[in-house]
Image: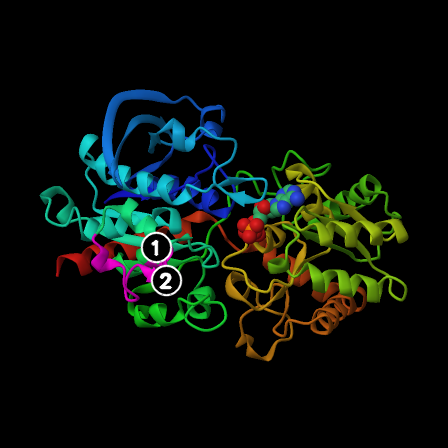
Amino acid sequence: MNILLATSEAVPFAKTGGLADVSGALPVELERLGHRPAVILPGYRQTRYCGQKIESLGIDFIVPIGSKMVTGRLSKSVMPGSNVPVYFIEQDQYFDRDQLYGADGKDYIDNCERFVFFSRAVLEAIRLLDLQVDVLHANDWQTGLVPAYLKTIYANVPRYQKIASVFTIHNIAFQGQFWHWDMLLTGLDWKYFNWHEMEFHGKLNLLKTGLVFADALSTVSRRYAEEIQAIPLGCGLEGLLQYRRDVLTGIINGIDPAEWNPATDKHLPERFDADTVGRGKPKCKAALQKELGLTQLAGVPLIASVGRLTDQKGFDLIADVIQRWVQTNDAQWVVLGTGQPKYHKLFESLAQRYPDKIAVRLEFSNALAHRIEAGSDMFLMPSRYEPCGLNQMYSLKYGSVPIVRETGGLADTIVGFGNPENQGRPANGFSFLEYSALALSETIRRACDLYRLQPGEWSKLVDIGMRQDWSWRNSANQYVELYLKTIGLKHV
Ligand code: ADP
């Protein structure tokens, strides 16, 4: 099968979030499964300096953007460790900038124009590069117009007629909404600017456009696929997603075993696997306590959180619980992250007041994130919502027991210890449903009790998590099934 993945970011060429990880890993795995994937993304400034070799293809093209004609160029590279071709749409006025989507906390004002151009160029590149495409897989609002162009401007052009389209939502909170006059940029007839298609409360909505025009839809976990069909997580698009639920699937992201494996991890002072965790983790824990300036105590649970310090990730609950616990309970806390200034202030002041119990690092450090996974006993993810989440899967692999709120991908990957609805599935963590500091606090209490009073049960929990397989192979197989089904739908 020939799959073209259209995306606004892909590791190692350009990254702001999880979409880049999916776009980097999925095609490589699809190739291993015997398919012929290719990736297409904008050629950003970041791309030029990412350390990969990129060659110009000497192909220029012109596409209409509103009343202007805009030129672009094609260049090519390859996904490291594979033969997957990666094509870049170069257009310096749009993409040769400091960041991908905005600067100083503000989106670039011409984001609509930039991604109208990119989406239109994806369709043109298929012709210019003479690509065989069975499935065109678009992702998030930046490529929402790709399925729409296939069904409209290119609908009667022979080489495009058989292409099936899949559209994946990575986070429905970001919809690419622009004022209605930007409709002119798309080159599409105003008749599509209605509330069944591209319009959303008077604005042009590019995510909605993708959801309407694609042959099949997916998102990054089964639970999130259900949640976005209802208020509040559907963010206004719940009705449309209910209407299209027959073609909506949830496929969890995988993790990269080359980067996240405690048996080979170059960032750790001591490496370990499921058989040696009993010896390896205490050494990693002692080293981490030393690195963070915490008192070196072996039997006290070390509880970690790593991530964007935002409301989405539940850091308000974490701060609340730490404040309740710090004076009365024996536990140590580490928080690594950057994000909203209110959380920076809050965690900084907590760390100043209780330096031997709370360590806070307000920075982005991949190496420290690895050492925290390896050295901690428990890992907190009380997210308000979580389309997929990766940290809980890293934690399982590193024997740090996840404590999560039952939402999105967290609900799909973590089976809570002692939860009656487990139906015989072996537990690999702790979970709770109600978004409250009390619920989080009670769940941490249950975890700490098991850790202290039933070390045998605790080790079993760790062992089950460490032996589970969260690699990309399973997820890529599910994408293949989705692609095949979609081609089938297209050809009936
Ligand atoms: P999201 O994509 O919503 O931010 P995920 O759990 O899916 O959340 O993935 C977050 C990724 O970013 C993980 O690999 C996590 O370790 C990493 N990360 C987030 N913040 C930091 C940080 N301050 N330092 C190091 N890694 C971080």
- Taking the magenta stretch, the answer to whether it contains residue 207 is yes
Q: State the mark number for residue 202.
A: 2
Identify which residue, 63 or 207, lies in the foreground.
63
Q: Position of residue 47 (x, y in %)?
A: 45, 29
Question: Is 58 located above or below residue 428 in the figure?
Answer: above
Residue 454 versus residue 380 in the image, above or below: below
Left or right: where 375 falls relative to 133: right
The residue to which callout 1 is attached is 180
Q: Position of residue 482 (x, y in %)?
A: 30, 57
Compare residues 37 and 196 and report the one nearer the observer: 196
Can you say which quadrant of the picture contains the N terminus?
A: top left
Q: Nearer the viewer, residue 274 or 213?
A: 213
Q: Is residue 354 visible?
A: no
Q: Residue at x 60, y 37 (%)?
A: 264
Question: In terms of secondary structure, where does tag 1 sit?
Answer: helix
Q: Which residues are magenta?
A: 189-208
The residue lying toward the viewer, choosing from 162 and 204, is 204
Q: Determine if the magenta segment contains residue 374.
A: no
Question: Is residue 492 shown left or right of residue 174?
Answer: left
Is residue 395 something one can see in this rendering? yes
Q: Work out whether mark 2 precedes mark 1 in sequence or the reverse, and give the earlier one.
A: 1
Residue 15's x, y, as percent? 50, 38
Q: Amino acid at mark 2?
A: Gly
